[in-house]
Amino acid sequence: MKTKKLTVAQAILAFLKNQYSGRDGEEYQFFAGCAGIFGHGNLAGFGQALQQSPDFPYIMVRNEQAAVHMAAGYAKMKNRLSTFACTSSIGPGATNMISGAAAATINRLPVLLLPGDIFAQRTVAPVLQQLESPFSQDLSVNDCFKPVSKYWDRIYRPEQILTSLPEVMRVLTSPSNTGTVTLSVPQDVQTEAYDFPVELFEKRVWHIPRPAADRQAMNRAVEWIKSSSSPIIIAGGGVLYSEAENELSAFIENTGIPVMETFAGKGSLPYNHPLNLGAAGATGTEGANFYSQRADLVIGIGTRYSDFTTASKTAFQNQSVKFININIAEFDAYKQSALALTGDARTILEELSEALKGYETEDSYQKEALRFNRDWDQKVEAAYTPDSKGLPSQSEVIGAVNTFSDPEDVLVCASGSLPGDLHKLWRTRNSKGFHLEYGYSCMGYEFPGALGVKLAAPEREVYVMLGDGGYLMMPSEIITSLQENYKLTVILINNHGFASIGGLSRSIGGEGFGTDYKFRNLETGQLDGEKLPVDLATNAESLGASVFRTDDIPSFKKALADAKREVKTTVIYIETVAERKMAGYGHAWWDVPIAEVSESDSVNEARLNYLEKKKKQRHFL
Ligand SMILES: Cc1ncc(C[n+]2csc(CCOP(=O)(O)OP(=O)(O)O)c2C)c(N)n1
Ligand SMILES: [Mg+2]
């Protein structure tokens, strides 16, 4: 047997460099490189191996969480066909990655984490940053990755990677099971050498399948669709990951079934497609909510049925509503007690189109969808149009960015009040143009996620929209974008606190408690004093970004044009009024439980209202 003597870290990198994904006859290098931060727990192992592998780029970030978000943003933009590996030291460096790991797993995006771990030898325990346990020595902080990983392993002996690495790749490239993969490598093991069989380092292509669904289930689905009078489609992220946009268009153009889109699925159709009802669920449009209330058949494609999508299970009120789920993941395909079409969205849509030849919904049903589409666009236009009084509202800012941007540009966002507004208002003209991390809605995703997008598609302009709260979670990654020379155009919306959570607080009778960025007021003892005089624009400037300070829509529009000419990361700063937000439409609702007993009348009133709404919740068993 031919072997090559390498350290474990060197061997893992040599393996990763030769992994490819393959789909539809194309091959893609699966790892674009490695991102992370060095400490004593990975410096001499992965650090050394990366240093002698200049063909495997190393990207230094400022917070390990950012490395994971960057990998996830990259993977999402690449439709999960490639990603980054992430390296960290032991202890806090490792645990900083947990939020990123959860975000990637929830969003079904492949990322590989290689946290350092405490010595396998144990001779010098407890080492710096070691979590000691009185009942077991087989425990470290890296065990915290288990619930947020789709595959988790710890390498105590070099030869263990021979069985672990193929599992790592199987899970990462599995469209039904992908998410975070964590391979903990103790700091001593990283540096140990072993004679690895050379086959480990040969090129491997992991074929990503496009399986068809079960024949019987398909037949039944065709019958169900044929006998439905008011069907509706929910397009989720799976439509995009499967690259099934054209097949979806063809399917609805033949069958006349209207579509509503989730956060991850927005962009499946252009915004002005006559059968596109727009945003689904709690942040949904009037048309989407109207159609879903009466639908007798819901065809979910690549959706997880999150509470935002189902308006916390109040979106579907037809007493005989049934569900058909097209999903590569069996786990999702069975949700809502659906008829499960487990398989690839593109393949299944093609087959359904063929089998449904001759079937079409009523003309009036389709015309009504068109009317909703056009009416909604007028609402969007009105929301985009400045009303010229005082500070602009967020929707005017969204309008300015959307109108200025090119169809190929990408919008990135994750948290705050922006996602809901964008879901309703962004006119998507390109299937990869709307990049929302709304599975975990992780404040801080914005900069590193956007950097991942830009790394994946450097030819596209990337617009990051975020609030002051989101900004303060991870402004440090502006520096990483400058270091890598990848430009982001950042729209920083300052409303002096958490407008989203403040609004939610008011809606539950909580009066916005703890959601404004204000001084502690010595009279009230609360955080309701003067506004804190933090200058976020200067903060961004000090990190190296170009900054445009704007105070109204005309100056904001000018800044967008100026920013386009900049070559490095540029921040456009604007203040908006927190109170003027987009309302919920139709039957949109989100279940946020209200205190059952309270000393406040407004809370008690909100509780009664809540119980009323709760009555509409349905369980599909
Ligand atoms: C890491 C993290 N912590 C807390 C939350 C809960 N949360 C959601 S939105 C939000 C406030 C966001 O503030 P900002 O970015 O200023 O946006 P705004 O609400 O003002 O639009 C908070 C605290 C979250 N989503 N992520
Ligand atoms: Mg804010």
Image: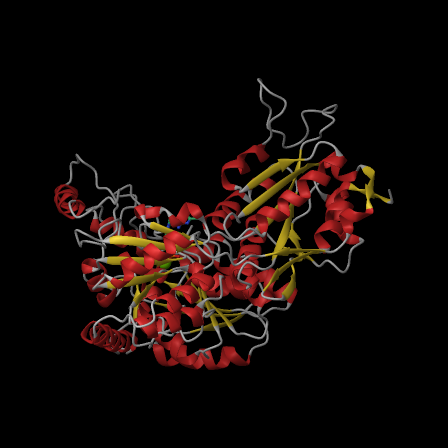
- Work out whether residue 329 can be spotted: yes
Figure quadrant of residue 162: top right
* Left or right of residue 297: residue 437: right
Tell me if 116 is positioned left or right of 494 in this view.
Answer: right
Taking depth in this image into account, of 326 and 156 the one nearest to the observer is 326
**Residue positioned 37% across, 66% down in the render:** 355
Q: Residue at x 61, y 47 (%)?
A: 170
Q: Is residue 551 above or below residue 480?
A: below
- The coloring applied to the image is secondary structure
Residue at 38 percent across and 56 percent down: it is 218
Rendering coords of residue 433 (x, y %) = 45, 70
Looking at the figure, which quarter contains the N terminus?
top right
Viewer-proximal residue among 57 and 265: 265
Q: How many marks?
A: 0
Work out whether residue 214 or residue 341 is closer to the camera in this orientation and state it. 214
Query: Quadrant location of the C terminus?
Result: top left
Say left or right for 598 vs 430.
left
Frontmost residue, 104 versus 359? 359
Q: Residue furthest top?
A: 135
Query: In this rendering, does residue 48 appear at all?
Result: no
Please indicate whether residue 376 sits to the left or right of residue 89 in the image. Answer: left
x%, y% of residue 609? 13, 47
Percent position of residue 608, x then y: 12, 43
Q: Say if 74 sits above or below 562 in the image.
A: above
Q: Position of residue 616 (x, y in %)?
A: 17, 48
Residue 112 in the image: above or below residue 259: above
| Figure quadrant of residue 155 | top right
